[in-house]
Amino acid sequence: MKIGILGTGTVGETIGTKLVELGHTVTMGSRDAANVKAAAWVKKAGKHAAAGTFKDAATAGEIVFNCTSGQGSVAAVTSAGEAALRGKVLIDVSNPLDFTKGPIPILSVGNTDSLGEQLQKAVPSAKVVKTLNTLGAPLMVNPRSLADSHNLFICGDDDGAKAKAVELLRSFGWRDEDIVDLGDITAARGVEAYVLLWVRIYRRFGSANFNLKLVRGK
Amino acid sequence: MKIGILGTGTVGETIGTKLVELGHTVTMGSRDAANVKAAAWVKKAGKHAAAGTFKDAATAGEIVFNCTSGQGSVAAVTSAGEAALRGKVLIDVSNPLDFTKGPIPILSVGNTDSLGEQLQKAVPSAKVVKTLNTLGAPLMVNPRSLADSHNLFICGDDDGAKAKAVELLRSFGWRDEDIVDLGDITAARGVEAYVLLWVRIYRRFGSANFNLKLVRGK
């Protein structure tokens, strides 16, 4: 499959590399088509990897991942453009974290709105699916690396789009029974809010190599 | 031990009943000393249960639980008063949930502040410990009812106060290895934010009988 990745950070690189390994053709997009990090990634990832602008990546991809940092996500998706994203599944992995206010990040949007919803509003004809934002990049694409099972949340307004996202998640190693569909895109308020707890746990453990398992009673 | 409970809702009643069962003497406090729910609880809970005002409960307790609904917590603790709470451990179980804005509650404080912090500011000479706010009342006092292990968060500025809270938590069935100390009271921002995710999971499962287990890699 042809997949676009918006963003050249650790998340974009990790997901992009996994997708190439799985046999997909990946275009990594950034503000500047000559982005140095994207070029280095293409060199490393091989012939099924390419780089370009946000618009190039969105145009090339049948499915597109938003892996930009939260503060730049609306601009990145807007720059990719509604025309390039129309009808496509846009998997939003970002979090609206603002690191400028102190040692512990805060959310720049939340409670009554979410970044997932803002992206859906920015490109109404795309089908935004929020997932993978609740864990560190290595775990996103290698969930079986933990000894116990653990859960992944997904939400979005379009069930077909969520099903397509789940297909890719399965290929990353996520099992159907571990994926929890929280409903429409407003549930992004919940999974993005959780990141404020994630950060505290991360600081406590000194490691991002953890995730949540939902333990249920009868 | 003598313990005060602020609040007559499900959480206060559940914790109060458990404490009486464990042999403690419990005073349940509310705005009105003649509160009907508190009187009914006292009748049911037996001779080691009493009822009174917030101030009565705080005065009677060597340790005090805040189990009021979040929108009334600062008023309740303020009404209990600094004099009654001075030097005491105040275990804050509340969440700043506002149910007036639609079918799904929002937080009335969060991100850069928390209810836990507001309570600590309201009664600076008390030692606020935030815990138990991340799960439903029955699980708070009966954690072993789930088949798998699961985690409980605790935070607060005073290590001695957290140790005293942990003693009570142990008597509820929480194991030391399942209790995660997230640091000072500002971590309440994390555990209170998580409740926005909890609500979404609750709606998905149609049950509050679940909790989180942190699954860690090596």
Image: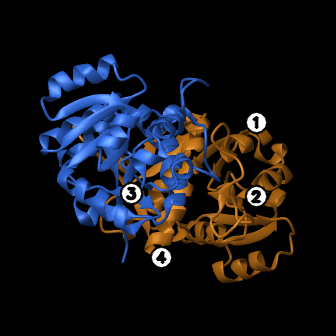
Chain colours: A blue, B orange
Tell me how far mark 4 sits from mark 3, CA to CA.
Answer: 16 Å
N-terminal of the two: label 4 or label 1? 1
**Callouts 3 and 1 on one subunit:** no
Q: Nearer the viewer, residue A187 or A193?
A: A187
Q: Nearer the viewer, residue B164 or B37?
A: B37
Looking at the image, do the residues carrying marks 3 and 2 touch, with CB atoms under 8 Å apart? no
**Callouts 4 and 2 on one subunit:** yes
Q: Nearer the viewer, residue B178 or A18?
A: A18
In this rendering, the answer to whether A215 lies above or below B37 is above
Return the mark for residue B71.
2
In the rendered image, which residue does mark 4 sit on?
A: B206
Left/right placement of residue A4 relative to residue A95 reads left
In the rendered image, which residue does mark 3 sit on?
A: A153
Quarter holding the C terminus of chain A? bottom left
Measuring from the top left, give residue A5's x and y in whole percent.
Answer: 32, 38
Tell me how far mark 2 sits from mark 1, CA to CA.
Answer: 20 Å
